[in-house]
Amino acid sequence: MISVLVAAVGVLGTALGAGLTAVIAARAENRRQAALEREQVRKELVQKDNQVLKLRVEHFRWRRERRQAAYLDFLQALAAADRANQQEFRTLKAATPPEPFAVDRIAEIRSLFKHAEQVGDLVLLEGPDQVAAATQELVLQFSLLVQAVRDFAEAHAGSAEDLHMRQQTIEGIGERYLAARLELLRAARIALDEIIDLR
């Protein structure tokens, strides 16, 4: 009877051991599967993050190239208008009053300025805010300069007595225009040198 009892305890111990081993093995397999699933999810997230990062870098590069082109187009258009305006001013300063009012030259300056303003709209759109504000200030200063040269041309045609004072006014506005141009260039450089935030 003892041998049967020992045998029963042995069988029971073996059965319990086998059951416990099966439970432990099942739990270990579940943990391993869970770890594999977590690793797969992590890999997918890393891959997705890398794709998003690549898209952000590409978008940033595209944006910087568009900004640079817009800034350059605007500055070139404004430079063309400025050259025409300066030429008219130099011509008037060198002439003895009364110099006839040059309607065609003034209209050409106005047309070049309007074109520069239109190109400047793209700069305002591309931004950033500091560049847009500097662009608006530059356009304002150039507008004042164009108007001052036009007024000078009209005064010159009428042999006005205050031509020297008007010349000084134009030169003062010209200095403010140049300062605004430098401010735009500074803001544009900062915008183009901006480093992408990869977060």
Image: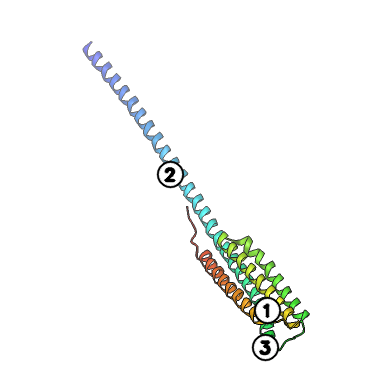
Q: Amino acid at mark 2?
A: Glu
Q: CA distance from mark 2 to mark 3?
A: 81 Å
Residue at screen point 53% across, 53% down: 52
Residue 108 occupies quadrant: bottom right
Q: Can residue 197 be seen from the camera position used here?
A: yes
Q: Is residue 24 above or below residue 112?
A: above
Task: Pick the residue in front: 48 or 100.
Answer: 100
Residue sitting farthest toward the front = 161
Residue lying at 69% horizontally and 84% vertically, measured from the top left: 92
What whole-number distance in Å separates the C-alpha atoms at marks 1 and 3? 14 Å
Tell me residue 77's x, y (percent): 66, 74
Say which residue label 1 marks: 85
Q: Nearer the viewer, mark 1 or mark 2?
A: 1
Measure the alpha-carbon separation of dots 1 and 2.
Answer: 68 Å
Amino acid at dot 3: Ala
Q: Residues within 10 Å of mark 3 (few under 14, many from 20)?
A: few
Q: Residues within 10 Å of mark 2 (few under 14, many from 20)?
A: few
User: What element does badge 2 sit on?
Assistant: helix
The disc at residue 94 is 3
Indicate the secondary structure of the residue bearing disc 1.
helix
Circle number at residue 196: none
Q: Nearer the viewer, mark 1 or mark 3?
A: 3
Question: Who comes first in sequence, dot 1 or dot 3?
Answer: 1
Q: Is the residue marked by circle 1 packed among few (<14), some (14-19), or many (20+) residues within 10 Å?
A: many
Q: Is residue 90 above or below residue 118?
A: below
Q: How many marks?
A: 3
- Three-letter amino acid code of the residue under disc 1: Asn
**Element type at marker 3?**
helix
Q: Residue furthest top?
A: 1
**In the rendered image, which residue does mark 2 sit on?**
39
